[in-house]
Amino acid sequence: MITDQRWADLLRTRATDPGVIGRAYAARRRRNLFADKDTLFLVAADHPARGALGVGADPLAMADRRGLLERLLVALANPEVDGVLGTPDVIEELLLLDGLHERVVIGSMNRGGLAGACWEIDDRFTGYDAQSIVDYGLDGGKMLLRLVDDDPGTIPTLEACANAVSQLAGHGLMAMVEPLPYQRLDGKLVLQQDTAALSRAVTIAAGLGVTSAYTWLKLPVPPSAAVLDATTLPILLLGGVPSGNPDTDLEKWGPPLRHPAVRGLVVGRTLLYPPDNDVATAVAKAAQLLKEIPA
């Protein structure tokens, strides 16, 4: 838990000593990507910057910043959790709370496609850029690439993601691309989760940039191994929208985690906001699932 005093100190520091954030980046103790294992387990907390705050029936679940940070610290306290994926505000708050030493930190780059906005697919880069990820000593950058064939907003996002992949690769840093095929049905964006649509998205994302040497893919659990067979790039499975039953979600992740291209999990709301609010247990169950994967 974040005590009242610790929270007051954080707020005071934010107001009176902004330079401490740069010092915290510089002082962070880093580790290599995999440490002593072959998988990665990251928690994701970049949803709020895109205005996506809802979990289940609560439309403002992730708006409570103190609560979000407490849940992240609980998750990061599990030694099987390798690190976090987040926007600068969240990463910096965790740095000030001493939560990111010896952890992998992936910076979220494009959050301009605000949830529900008419321009949502034109997902501008409004977070970290490649140079700041280098300067702040982060371990890579993540970008969201929603593909909608009848929305021209896809084009600038596609180009911006390609440029980011090239720039990160130029510094030898991971570019984590999350390609998601959508259709607009009755004015609402609907994720296409069939094998054909997901396989096509994988092949598009894999071809971005001047090299794919440092590209990783972040993908939803596919309906078929054929999606995972569409690339040689390392894959991390995303948690997606919670079903309301964490055990069901875990069961769904099991089979694709055994595919040789899959290297782990990036999970956000499913583990941070389980129905019983027992974050530690939800994280431990996911960690155990990863440990059971044959080497």
Image (tube, helix red, strand yellow):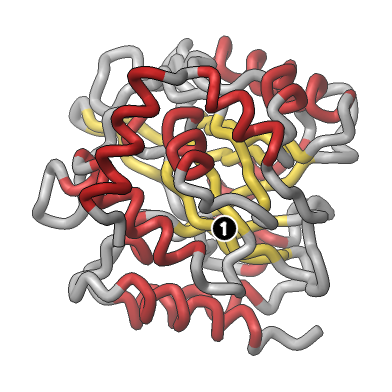
Element at badge 1? Answer: strand
Q: Percent x, y for residue 182?
A: 42, 36
| Residue type (three-letter) at the residue carrying disc 1 | Leu
**Can residue 19 be seen at all in this image of the molecule?**
yes
Left or right: 191, with 39 as reference point = left
Residue at position x 28%, y 43% from top?
7
Q: Percent x, y for residue 287?
A: 55, 78
Left or right: 24, with 207 as reference point = left
Left or right: 167, with 284 as reference point = right
- The correct choice, above or below, for 197 with respect to 160 in the image is below
Which one is in front, 229 or 215? 215
**Can residue 204 be seen at all in this image of the molecule?**
no
Q: Percent x, y for residue 108?
A: 55, 33
Which quarter of the rendering shows the C terminus?
bottom right
Which one is in front, 28 or 215? 28
Q: Percent x, y for residue 224?
A: 58, 68
Left or right: 172, with 47 as reference point = right
- Residue under pointer 1: 42
Instruction: Locate residue 129: give its quadrant.
Output: top right
Residue at position x 26%, y 48% from top?
5
Q: Dot 1 surroundings within 10 Å: few (below 14), some, or many (20 or more)?
A: many
- The correct choice, above or below, for 157 with respect to 187 in the image is above
- The correct choice, above or below, for 225 with respect to 124 in the image is below
Which quarter of the rendering shows the N terminus?
bottom left
Instruction: Locate residue 230: give its quadrant.
Output: bottom right
Residue at position x 31%, y 28% from top?
12
Number of marks: 1
Residue at position x 34%, y 79% from top?
248
